[in-house]
Amino acid sequence: MRIPNLPIIENTKDLPIETLRAKGKEREGGWANAPSLPHSPGSRVLPYALSSVHYALIDVSFDSLTLRSVTAQLNETIIAGKAISVIQSSSHEFILRIAARGELHNLLFSIHPVYARVHLTSVCPKKAKRWHFADFLQKHTEDGKIVAIEQIDFDRMIRIRIIPQGEIIDPAPKILIGEFMGKHSNVILVEEGTNRILESMKHIDETMSRYRQILPGSIYVMPPMSQTLNPFSTDEETFSAVLASGDGPLWERLLRNFQGMSPLLAKEVVARTPDSSLEAVRNTFMNLMTDIQDGKFRPTVITRDTHKQDVLAVSAINLQQFHDKNPISFPTISDALEFFYKRLIAKESLLAEKTGILRAVEKRYEALQQKHKSLDHRLKVAENADDLKLKGELLIANLYRIERGQKEVSLQNFHDPDGAKITVQLDERLSPSQNAQRYFEEYKRAKRSKDVLARLVSENQAALESLQEVMEETEKAQDLDALTAIRDDLVRKGVIRERRTGERHTPKKETKSLFRRFKSSDGFQIYLGRNDKENELLIKREAGKSDMWLHAKQIEGSHVIVRNPERRPDIPRRTLLEAAIIAAHFSKARHSSTVPVDYTWVKHVNKPRGAKPGFVIYTHEKTLFVSPSDFDKLSATPTNPSAT
């Protein structure tokens, strides 16, 4: 069943950007002088929140093609299902729980400015707090039957028609509209027939937009379509004429002229084309559009690494443009999206946490550098204390030659074999003997401060080196657990302030999540220290004397332990090589072609008294030479969540 089309109201408020400019309509800040912003090919213009970088030009992963595949999956799984409940976890995300075909499905809606999307998910958060939109949506759709789901044109918009059942506030059919357009994303509940907005996740009033208000009680108006071509109905002649008349790369011409084209999809058309002729591009385009129209989807996630954690892209089709990367196929588009966004959000969170720590540490580092310059200057003055003493002695020996009121005097240095003269500055207000005493007092102060300043310079230099190590540890941290340990240590040292109540943070994990852990091809557990604190704990508390210890030879890096609970007299060479590759990869020599890695039993590893955390000395070592680049090909696999 097709949902009745909601009207596109034609008025000056909702015309495309070009038409608005042509009619001389100016928004606050001035349309007349605004730069020419290319709007989204195949999508609708949202004039209430335009920015210098339009949302359609961002290479988003949730594009019109992905939504088409999601819509097809939803029509296979939840159509004719019953809306059970609504669970909202944040201001931009909620889950609509639906019972269909004897199963309970979780339909995720997100209007996050970067991660906006809709798909089925296996995870359903607990209802931590009440949200107005969730309560409102549940009251108006509870036990409602989902009778139709469709994508609006080939755009990032979806409509779900729900017919309420039983005793509810308003029995009229409702339409749940999802607009997934970057920072302009929204989810809106509309009453069918009147097109009256009942509620929305985000309210857009006149202060935010003069062209399209989204408020309860107002009439829903779809964003106006840009002047682009339908990719499913464009004939060959029109296609060739459009591409031939444009300039720039082929994928940009596709992006500008056809509905629903994202940079990812446009580049895929070019990647599948055997040559750059317009005929070849046209044939590839037509064949791909036919496959999309026929629902021939192959959900795929592209990763940069063989461990399948560093995600690069997700699509409803196999992406040939990433032929040198690692593709992962999924049975459904929702499975692919859940896999992709879980890792993408974790990656972005990791980068955000790294940036926060590095910014705070660099600020402290710069302050210590300035302090070091000041201390160094004062130390150099103190180191010249003997010159002050000499001047005092020369003044005492020549009192008879000096008169009060002199500003300086040139005296022969009797300590110099050549009898060179020294110019001594005088305070004209003091007598000659008082000037001599002044130099002796300055000498005593300088001598006393010399030792103190030398100690302060040494301590400050150690603090600078420590912060340098922290920055290096932060840069190489692979997970939020490692960054949390670094942040906690910096808070304890007063480098970073403690988080305020309500500020986003990562909960502290139990001891079992300490260290990064791997399992070797031979079944041995391999532990990796991710910072000085963990390196210290690894040696002092975790490792047994019969375990094997590895470290990059004479190079800063992580401590690695191969657990040996059975106390075997030797460790298989394959496991040793895998552990050595891990040690080399997590060292400062990770970009070298070959790295020497020492290994010895833990019983031969000791920490000197008073040494800084993570510093050890060892004996009875042997050395392996390995390539850090082999880490991506490693057979050893991570065994704890924080290692992924």
Image: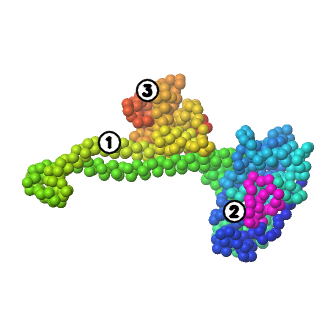
Q: Residue 208 in the image: x percent, y percent?
A: 71, 62
The reply, left or right, for residue 535 in relation to residue 45 is left
Q: Which residue is mark 1?
A: 455
Q: Which mark is residue 603?
A: 3
Q: Nearer the viewer, residue 557 or 267?
A: 557
Task: Name which residue lies at 43% across and 46% down.
Answer: 468
Q: Residues within 10 Å of mark 1 (few under 14, many from 20)?
A: few
Q: Nearer the viewer, residue 479 or 440?
A: 440
Which residue is situated farthest in the top direction here? 566
Q: Is residue 517 magenta?
A: no
Give the mark nearest the N terminus, 2 or 1: 2
Dot 3 amino acid type:
Lys
Q: Does residue 152 appear anywhere in the picture?
A: yes
Q: Which residue is mark 2?
A: 49
Question: How far apart are labels 2 and 1 at the CA level?
Answer: 58 Å
Q: Residues within 10 Å of mark 2 (few under 14, many from 20)?
A: few
Task: Name which residue lies at 34% across and 43% down.
Answer: 456
Question: How far apart are labels 3 and 1 at the CA level?
Answer: 36 Å
Dot 2 amino acid type:
Ala
Q: Residue 77 in the image: x percent, y percent?
A: 82, 45
| Quadrant for the C terminus in the image | top right
> Where are the magenta residues, as a range?
199-226
The answer to which quarter of the image holds residue 409 is: bottom left
Q: Does residue 476 appear anywhere in the picture?
A: no
